[in-house]
Image (cartoon, rainbow, N blue to C red):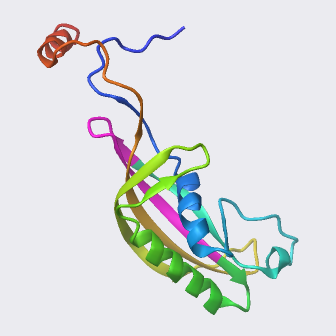
Amino acid sequence: MTTPNQYSFYETVKPPPTESLVVSYLAPLMDPLRILTRIPPQEALEDTVKKDTFIRIESAGGAGDSMTGIYTLHIILHSYAPYNSEVLAEDNLATAIAWMGNALGSTVVTLDNYEWYIIDSNVLSNMHHLTDPRLPLARYRSSIMWAVEGNVIAPISTGKTAAELRNWAKENR
């Protein structure tokens, strides 16, 4: 059995689930366009399932700060459309970029009922055309950065004063 550190200097903060968070944010804003986390099954030479379009979300890493509980999320957006609909794929991505770049101050509730507060949002790279050798689809890609407050799952522990915690840390280096 594991016991949490009885002299925890910081709150234990859960990072945001990047892909779930972005799907929860974009899906109502972009409806009826599908916002997915993976490419639907494809036939070898088929354009897209049911010939529709979609945006795929990909988590591209990021970082967290245990002192502030703030996580930076790097997100890649992929916009797909049938091979003869490049303008549609490009326009869908432009709309998604606009919403993602203006997410600052939004609170998003994910399916697990956690609330996530977006404290910063930036477009890191504007859209660019990209081919995928596995699929005969038009695809555009962009990247976004969000800074999001994590959710506290365990508070600072012990009831010790800051001075007592500092002394304990010095003694136990």
Question: Can you give x and y, in whole percent of width and height, for residue 81 in the image?
Answer: 70, 82
**Quadrant occupied by the N terminus:** top right
86 or 117: nearer the eye? 117
Question: Can you give x and y, in whole percent of width and height, for residue 136 in the image?
Answer: 76, 80
Region in magenta: 63-79
Residue at 35% x, 64% y: name it. 104
Q: Is residue 16 left or right of residue 89?
A: left
37 or 133: nearer the eye? 37
Which image quadrant for residue 87?
bottom right
Image height check: is 100 above or below 137?
A: above
Q: Is residue 150 left or right of residue 58?
A: left
**Quadrant occupied by the C terminus:** top left
Q: What secondary structure is the stretch in magenta mostly built from?
A: strand
Q: Residue furthest left?
A: 163
**Is residue 48 one of those drawn in magenta?**
no
Question: Can you give x and y, in whole percent of width and height, for residue 43 in the image?
Answer: 88, 71
Q: Is residue 84 left or right of residue 94?
A: right
